[in-house]
């Protein structure tokens, strides 16, 4: 056996000793143990090597070499465990590594020691939970350390394989190159339509793929979100069995990819688009219904089915092993939050109150519309020759009647909309919607569904989903406008289309709670979405309703300024599969309009004129059949 260095035989060191020399000798002996087989076979030689580092540490426990000695002791005992298989050596290795961080917090070797602990706990102790805690200490306590990247990689792998949550510091801030957090999936489904909305903590790159039917397994649509993460608690199975949508599975497909799989009974077509502020991906899927749309709408005398309710959060479910090949874990579905209902405060009671228009949620109104503002909707049909009837729309050719109308009172809950003169937009439009619903039921005998019956918050994309899953034939969204200038007043009616009008884009941006720059980006998305939308029918509905309001509300006793029919990309109208319009009923920021909005008689007149406009649209459609 080769003779050990002098350091191996020295019994003690004094503070005056050359610690650096002894440390280098101890390292040399350690390397000899690892490379010289005849030396390394003896456990006693390994214990001598441990004694070398221990004596250096004890000679000067606060020297610069102290943390390095503890780290080397950890490595030495770790190698001893692998060489001789004694559990006591593994325990010693973990203890010495932990002492580096505990006794010398902030030292440059502390993150190396914590990483070594994590590897031992993961590979030798086989305790991924404790290993993740050690790796997590590195990214939280030593974010500038050289082991952070390796620790993050291990944490992502553990999260994917063992459903261990990532430290918060690793998720949600794209500016720090963190993973984007994918939030619980929300959905609405009927027999032939499904809308799924996936919210994320920030913009994310995603791709989709449609998997064809294999045996008895239906076609499946999956979406991969890159550089993303979903918390383990949102990876539980969610069997839905609700209309077209059978199941949503969400899982950590790879350490930095979240996969969402939609198990759908049948897929005829689908569209995927993203919306900003907050970023979310919307998936609209159209399936092959067991009964045709005509049968459903005209063959039934009963009310339409209500929107599919959101199921409660599943708890305590077993893992779905069959889903592992695609997502590893299915997804949790989130319910919408309810808020306390409030009533409208009459404007005349607070005439001295200063004007307030809520930030980010306020609407910017338009100045008096010119002829150029009243944009004729884009259409691919040619004008009919004089004396000949214009070509029938598809809806007219199919002879579809109007049996269900969805009214959408804008805002609600935590989103009050515009505020001025003691009134809130959310309260006014809810009141108008209820009065209009009564009028439509009384005069037309139709089923009327409100997207909200009280003071609750609904995301814009949910409102459209309610209309689609209800099989609605018409969709009317009700809003109140606002403008920084109290001189601006009047009413205007919108339908979904691209817009080159800056003021119309501002109104849409306010209603969408986004920016005009993002609205410009959205126009590119709309080019594809609106190819098969109801633009022409929506334009006709808008003009009929607006004309009815103009005929009754631009002369005494109730005078509103006619600001025309316009077009703009409103989120709430995107994806509507029926004629859909948005009405800005008046300007709450104008004292004259606000006074009318607080008048119950005016609200009744307003509801009546909108109802007449809808009846006129239906009669005009029927007359051409």
Image (cartoon, rainbow, N blue to C red):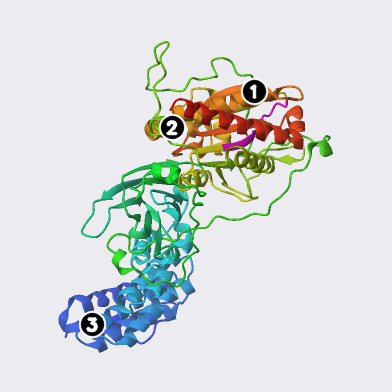
Task: Report helix, strand or loop for mark 3.
Answer: helix
Task: Report helix, strand or loop for mark 1.
Answer: helix
28 relative position to 548: left or right: left
**Dot placed on the residue nearer the N-terminal end, 2 or 3:** 3
Q: Residues within 10 Å of mark 1 (few under 14, many from 20)?
A: many
Disc 3: which residue? 83
Residue 550: which numbered mark, if any? 1
Highlighted magenta segment, given as a residue range = 477-486
Whole-number angstrom distance, CA of label 1 to CA of label 3: 91 Å
In the image, residue 515 above or below residue 148: above
* Residue 488, horizontal then vertical, whole percent: 69, 24
In the image, residue 423 above or below residue 319: above
Q: Is residue 251 visible?
A: yes
Whole-number angstrom distance, CA of label 2 to CA of label 3: 74 Å
Quadrant containing the C terminus is top left
Residue at the bottom extreme? 44
Disc 2: which residue? 534
For image coordinates 42% across by 11% down, the residue present is 387
For image coordinates 34% across by 47% down, the residue present is 287
In depth, the one of 211 and 63 nearer the eye is: 211
Is-magenta flag for residue 485? yes
């Amino acid at each position: 056996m080769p003779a050990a260095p002098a350091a191996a035989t020295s019994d003690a060191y004094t503070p005056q000793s050359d610690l650096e020399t002894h440390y280098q000798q101890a390292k040399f002996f350690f390397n000899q143990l690892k490379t010289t087989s005849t030396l390394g076979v003896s456990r006693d030689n390994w214990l001598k090597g441990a004694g070398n580092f221990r004596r250096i540490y004890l000679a000067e426990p606060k020297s610069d070499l102290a943390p390095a000695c503890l780290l080397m002791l950890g490595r030495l005992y770790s190698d001893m465990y692998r060489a001789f298989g004694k559990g006591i050596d593994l325990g010693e290795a973990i203890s010495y590594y932990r002492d580096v961080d505990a006794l010398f917090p902030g030292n440059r070797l502390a993150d190396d020691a914590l990483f070594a602990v994590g590897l031992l706990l993961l590979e030798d102790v086989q305790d991924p939970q404790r290993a993740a805690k050690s790796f997590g200490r590195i990214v939280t306590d030593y974010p500038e350390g050289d082991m952070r990247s390796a620790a993050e990689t291990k944490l992502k792998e553990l999260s994917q394989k063992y459903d261990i949550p990532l430290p918060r510091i690793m998720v949600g801030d794209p500016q720090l190159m963190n993973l984007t957090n994918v939030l619980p999936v929300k959905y609405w489904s009927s027999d032939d339509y499904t809308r799924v909305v996936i919210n994320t903590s920030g913009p994310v790159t995603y791709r989709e793929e449609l998997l064809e039917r294999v045996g008895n397994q239906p076609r499946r649509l999956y979406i991969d979100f890159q550089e993303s993460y979903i918390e383990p608690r949102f990876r539980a199975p969610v069997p839905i069995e609700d209309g077209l949508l059978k199941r949503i599975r969400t899982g950590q497909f790879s350490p930095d990819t979240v996969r969402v799989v939609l198990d759908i009974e049948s897929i005829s077509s689908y569209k995927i688009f993203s919306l900003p502020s907050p970023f979310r991906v919307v998936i609209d899927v159209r399936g092959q219904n067991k009964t045709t749309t005509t049968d459903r709408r005209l063959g039934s005398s009963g009310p339409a089915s209500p929107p599919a309710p959101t199921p409660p959060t599943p708890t305590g479910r077993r893992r779905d092993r069959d889903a592992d090949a695609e997502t590893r874990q299915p997804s949790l579905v989130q319910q919408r939050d309810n808020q306390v209902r409030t009533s409208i405060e009459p404007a005349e009671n607070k005439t001295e109150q200063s004007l307030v228009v809520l930030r980010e949620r306020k609407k910017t109104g338009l100045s008096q519309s010119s002829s150029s503002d009243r944009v004729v909707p884009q259409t691919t049909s040619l004008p009919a020759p004089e004396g000949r009837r214009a070509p029938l729309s598809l809806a007219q050719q199919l002879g579809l009647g109007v049996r269900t109308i969805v009214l959408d009172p804008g805002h609600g809950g935590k989103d009050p909309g515009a505020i001025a003169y003691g009134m809130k937009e959310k309260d006014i439009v809810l009141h108008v919607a209820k009065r209009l619903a009564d009028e439509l039921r009384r005069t037309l005998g139709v089923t009327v569904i409100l997207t909200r019956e009280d003071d609750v918050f609904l995301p814009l994309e949910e409102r459209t989903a309610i209309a689609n899953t209800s099989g609605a034939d018409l969709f009317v969204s009700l809003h109140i406008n606002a403008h920084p200038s109290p001189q601006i007043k009047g009413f205007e009616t919108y339908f979904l289309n691209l817009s080159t009008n800056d003021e119309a884009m501002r109104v849409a941006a306010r209603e969408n709670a986004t920016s005009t720059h993002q609205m410009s980006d959205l126009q590119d998305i709309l080019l594809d979405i609106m190819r098969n939308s109801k633009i022409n029918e929506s334009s006709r509905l808008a003009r009929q309703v607006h004309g009815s309001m103009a005929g009754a509300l631009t002369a005494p006793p109730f005078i509103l300024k006619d600001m025309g029919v316009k077009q703009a990309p409103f989120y709430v109208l995107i994806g509507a599969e029926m004629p859909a319009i948005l009405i800005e009923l008046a300007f709450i920021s104008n004292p004259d309009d606000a006074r009318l909005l607080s008048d119950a008689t005016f609200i009744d007149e307003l509801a009546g004129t909108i109802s007449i406009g809808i009846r006129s649209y239906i009669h005009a459609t029927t007359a051409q059949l």
